[in-house]
Amino acid sequence: MKLLRYEQETVVNYNAGEQTATLYTRDKAVMRKLDTLVAGFPDTYKQTEQDEVSKTYSFPKLYVCYRKPRAGSTEQRERARQMMIAKNKAKED
């Protein structure tokens, strides 16, 4: 079944009273990532449900992560830009 991009949702659910988080997804890219984690770390990540368009996983809620946006200095951005220019020139040669 083909889903619209809008329908390819992912929902993470947890509460203060439990140690596990539940992740429900209809996004195939997220499913592939979680399936890899389930295969690699079966004691930590578990697939709990599946139907024709979605999967549900459970894992410790401490693995839910929030990060600050990366803020590089002007110098760092310029250095990265110069490296990309050099890399592209090397590919052309």
Image (spheres, grey):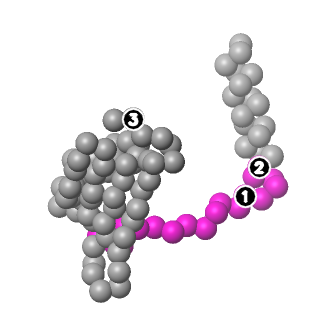
SS for dot 1 = loop
Tell me the CA gap for discs 2 and 3: 40 Å
Q: Which residues are magenta?
A: 60-77
| Crowd tier of the residue under label 1, counting other residues whose Cα lies within 10 Å: few below 14, some 14–19, many 20 or above | few
In the rendered image, residue 33, in percent from the top left (x then y), is placed at 36, 47
Report the quarter where the N terminus lies: top left
Residue 8, above or below 14:
above
Q: Amino acid at mark 3?
A: Lys
- Where is mark 1, residue-wise? 72
Image disc number at residue 37: none
Q: Nearer the viewer, mark 3 or mark 1?
A: 3
SS for dot 2 = helix
Image disc number at residue 77: 2
- Does any portion of residue 10 appear in the rendered image? yes
Q: Residue at x 74, y 22 (%)?
A: 89
- Give the residue at the far top of this rendering: 93
Q: Nearer the viewer, mark 2 or mark 3?
A: 3
| Crowd tier of the residue under label 3, counting other residues whose Cα lies within 10 Å: few below 14, some 14–19, many 20 or above | few
- Does any portion of residue 36 appear in the rendered image? no
Q: In which quarter of the view is residue 47 placed?
A: bottom left
- Where is mark 3, residue-wise? 2
Q: Earlier in the sequence, mark 2 or mark 1?
A: 1
* Observer-nearest of 72 and 69: 69
